[in-house]
Amino acid sequence: MTEQQDTLLRVSGLKTHFRTEQGTIRAVDGIDFEIKRGETFGIVGESGCGKSVTAYSIMQLIERPQGDIVSGSIEYMGEGARPIDIAALDPNGPDMRNLRGNEIGMIFQEPMTSLNPIYTIGNQIIEAIVLHQRVSKMEARKRAIELLDRVGLSDPRSQIDDYPHQLSGGMRQRVMIAMALSCNPRLLIADEPTTALDVTVEAQILDLMRDLQQDFGMSIMLITHNLGVVAENCDRVMVMYLGKVIEEGSAVDIFYNPRHPYTHGLLESIPQIGLSSRLTPIEGAVPMMQDIPTGCTFAPRCPHVMAICEDDPPMLFPSDSERTKCWLYSEEALPQHAK
Ligand SMILES: Nc1ncnc2c1ncn2[C@@H]1O[C@H](COP(=O)(O)OP(=O)(O)OP(=O)(O)O)[C@@H](O)[C@H]1O
Ligand SMILES: [Mg+2]
């Protein structure tokens, strides 16, 4: 298999900005990553770092006109076809609608904003199926029941006629997964699919997604703020801070051998069962998007800050299997710039 065939999605130099009265918000500011076929790729970072905007950019669901993809490409390699640059497609055009309905499914961060309270869950799944696949309503209903069964609803034949408010949070999340899977996607984007759920239900939903990935053979882009979830579920991961990638590597390496001081901070803020020690939050607050430091964006909060960090932005320095955007990992920078 060539490298080109193996890659399903390649994002290069992506910038998605919003114009607001307070100035330009560089929500995503020049990120590069690839998702391979069949893998689970994690995106992790604190609130506001640009995870959802990355997902919305891939789906071309950025709120316009205040938001826009201002540069970069999002190449999607569907079956046999030449790559399609999603960033260049009309968000409302037929090609983008086709990708959203037949190739890329998304589980949104807020289930209640994407499930319509006035329609039954069955109606909503059936509508999605009929819209994108040439099947009758009867066929679509049969397929919806199969999907609801597959995602673990106990009585899908009757629950298909329930309204969203009749279901628990965990059940609604399962319905969201069924909706996202109704198009048999090659790529499933899951934006914090378990944040609103308690730990037991979270584990069940993540197990379910792993099983479905094996059955459907899809790639998953899993967005979370929890590095523990990444370690258990992802193959590779990128860590975002203020719209940029600050570290990337295999999930195992990032979890067991994190290099960037920010990633260390994220790890120390994960609760661990059985450990009574207090969580250590990362010091300081994320700067306002309009007020980003000129050197390393993490410098004002970094316990290892050096003089160079305040002046020059670091690049992604490679090591064996990770790449880390931190001057601590640049051999030339260290000796002469240490404070
Ligand atoms: N429609 C919008 N208009 C203006 N700014 C926006 C808009 N959508 C997102 N942003 C800004 O872009 C930045 C990134 O937001 P995003 O939703 O991607 O964060 P996130 O990493 O998903 O955070 P969370 O973990 O809280 O979901 C934030 O500063 C946010 O305020
Ligand atoms: Mg988000």
Image (cartoon, rainbow, N blue to C red):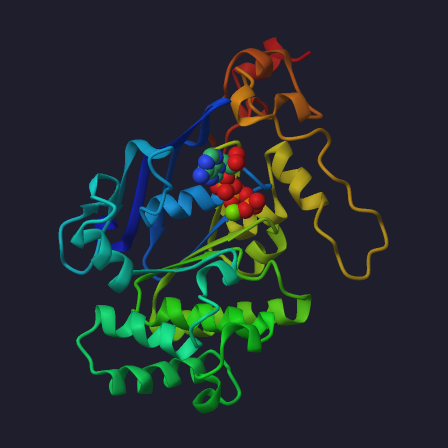
Q: How many marks?
A: 0
Residue positioned 50% across, 21% down in the render: 314
Q: Residue 130 in the image: state x and y as whole percent.
A: 24, 74
Residue at 58%, 26% in the rendered image: 288
Q: Position of residue 155 (x, y in %)?
A: 50, 90
Vertical comparison of 137 with 124: above or below: below
Q: Residue at x 65, y 13 (%)?
A: 338
- Left or right, 14 with respect to 247, comes to left
What x and y, as percent, mark residue 86?
24, 45
Please say if 269 is above or below 297: below
Residue 265 appears left or right of 229: right
Which percent across, then down, holds residue 154? 53, 87
Q: Residue furthest top?
A: 336
**Residue 280 lies in quadrant:** top right
Q: Nearer the viewer, residue 268 or 92?
A: 92
Between 18 and 194, the one nearer to me in the picture: 18
Extreme right residue here? 276
324 or 146: nearer the viewer: 146
Q: Residue furthest left?
A: 81
Q: Which quarter of the figure has residue 57? A: top left
Q: Is residue 196 visible?
A: yes
Q: Name the image quarter holding the C terminus.
A: top right
Which image quarter is the N terminus in? bottom left
Residue 44 visible from this viewpoint? no
What residue appears at the point 44 percent right and 83 percent down from the top-left corner? 160
Question: Quarter of the image holding residue 125?
Answer: bottom left
